Amino acid sequence: MSAAMATEEEEEEDIVAETEIDEYESEIDIDDFEKEAKFAVKEFSTSLSRQLASEEETDEKRESRKQKRKKATSRDIPDHFLPKVAIVGRPNVGKSALFNRLCWGNFIIQGNRAIVVDEPGVTRDRLYGRSFWGEHEFMVVDTGGVVTVSKSQANVMEDLAISTTIGMDGISLASREAAVARMPSMIEKQASAAVEESSVIIFLVDGQAGLTAADVEIADWLRRNYSNKCIILAVNKCESPRKGIMQASEFWSLGLSPLPISALSGTGTGELLDLVCSGLGKIECPENLNEEETYIPAIAIVGRPNVGKSSILNALVGEDRTIVSPISGTTRDAIDTEFVGPDGQKFVLIDTAGIRRRATVASSGSVTEALSVNRAFRGIRRSDVVALVIEAMACITEQDYKIAERIEKEGKGCLIVVNKWDTIPNKNQQTATYYEQDVREKLRTLQWAPIVYSTAIAGQGVEKIIVAASTVEKERSRRLGKRGRVYYCTQAAIRPPTFVFFVNDSNLFPETYRRYMEKQLRSDAGFAGTPIRLLWRSRRKMEKDEVKGATRPQNNLTPRSEKLAVAT
């Protein structure tokens, strides 16, 4: 009798425990969890954005507003389908200011804002921005100042603000002089490439400085080589419309019709855009482009100065897209380049300026470098994946670690590129292993980032960068499928010990996982010499049982405890 009563009490305890579990389970709402999770993500993103807020936020807000306006007036056409408009001229005539006016002052769609500083030689590579005027949409190309060959090397260095000392430590005097001598031709090569690919050329001159010998030489060069293209002579810095006509009059001698404008105030830019659009061809673009086809992931190439970022870009695209030089700070703007990988995947490659320590930049007093570093951080923010480039022979510094922290805070995918791998002497099979251990130890925030070894100047290993970046981008965009969730577990019976797991869906727990749970229970709680049972109860099944129970006739609903009492 006592054994029967003990059994009855144990079963009644089990019933009470199960009732409590059912009540607990009924309070769980998966939808509430999902909503709370989305709210938590939004709250974290907002907090992070405030933390990383910088001076470029105003530009981003303006871009966002104009992006909305664009959606109502323009189709989403990939950049490579749009006609191009190149801005050329000698240094310091206001090309970058006009680029910003055309792209940012007249309903910009997307692109970079060029660095504008009151000093010559700031722009060196080609910089692309997207703009439209009326029903016309096009790409604007900013170029470096074209320096004529008749100038002496000293004058060229002054025009381009080239230093033979800053950032040239460890480079021989002969190499310095050679690098300086090559710089003008490299800049002109970039300008020539922009003109070659453009339908319209805006030849910009300075109305306040007046006509110069350099303007005459550039005009002759354009007329001689590009007479088949639409060439527009724009006389900049004509803020006053009345004085502008007088300032522009002396440029008639170039054989082109001068148009007075002001990139600063916008005077005359409407008429300039009318002339630009009259010279544009028809856009040939497929009509059935979907969102997946127009989405192109961006890869930012970042790192300290002179680690080979521009060499990597040029090796990937197979052309001198950016200027490569031992002169520190050669790259200034963040340069966007479209690239198609071996598997046909399209990317936008963002080459950035070298990022030096903030204190070092401040002590140098260079406004241009400060803006360049700011553009580099904006490049990280605009990207999907960041390739952090370090030099193989150089030690990993605190600045590398800070850049790594910034990448992680921005939530970007990342791969670490160890460039100039050929400079490591006496390499063997263990060299890469030891090097990776060192990188992992010093860049702890990027423990999860893959490492790629390359020698960009020789084109070795650069294809692995794109393969790794593509993998990272796919992983960053991956969403896990539905996974099993355990809400609650209790020991529901003894002889043998029986445990009930309340889960979202028992089908999501394979037999291997169930055996693992049994092994864990035995490891933690014992149960030697007896089998144990694990029962998996789905929430979905519980809800169905509740619905069935609610539809039964009331005379059949006898409480389980009463049934046990009758049986006893």
Image (spheres, rainbow, N blue to C red):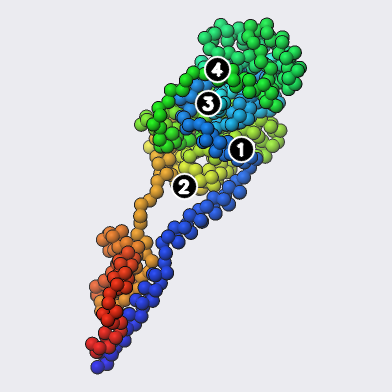
What's the residue type where badge 1 is placed?
A: Arg
**Which residue is drawn at the image coordinates 67% and 26% (left, top)?**
266
Tag count = 4
Tag 1 secondary structure: helix
4 or 2: mark nearer the eye: 4
State how far apart marks 3 and 4 are (Cα): 11 Å
Residue 145 at x, y percent in the picture: 62, 18
What's the residue type where badge 3 is placed?
A: Glu
Which residue is identified by label 2? Answer: 447
Residue 63 at x, y percent in the picture: 58, 36
Residue 140 at x, y percent in the picture: 56, 24
**Which residue is drawn at the image coordinates 56% and 44% (left, top)?**
406
3 or 2: mark nearer the eye: 3
State how far apart marks 1 and 2 are (Cα): 36 Å
Residue 99 visible, this angle: yes
State how far apart marks 4 and 2 are (Cα): 54 Å
Which residue is identified by label 4? Answer: 278
What's the residue type where badge 2 is placed?
A: Gln
Which residue is identified by label 1? Answer: 62
Which residue is identified by label 3? Answer: 135
State how far apart marks 3 and 2 are (Cα): 49 Å
What's the residue type where badge 4 is placed?
A: Ser
Tag 2 secondary structure: loop
Residue 402 falls in image quadrant: top right
Q: Is residue 94 left or right of residue 75?
A: right
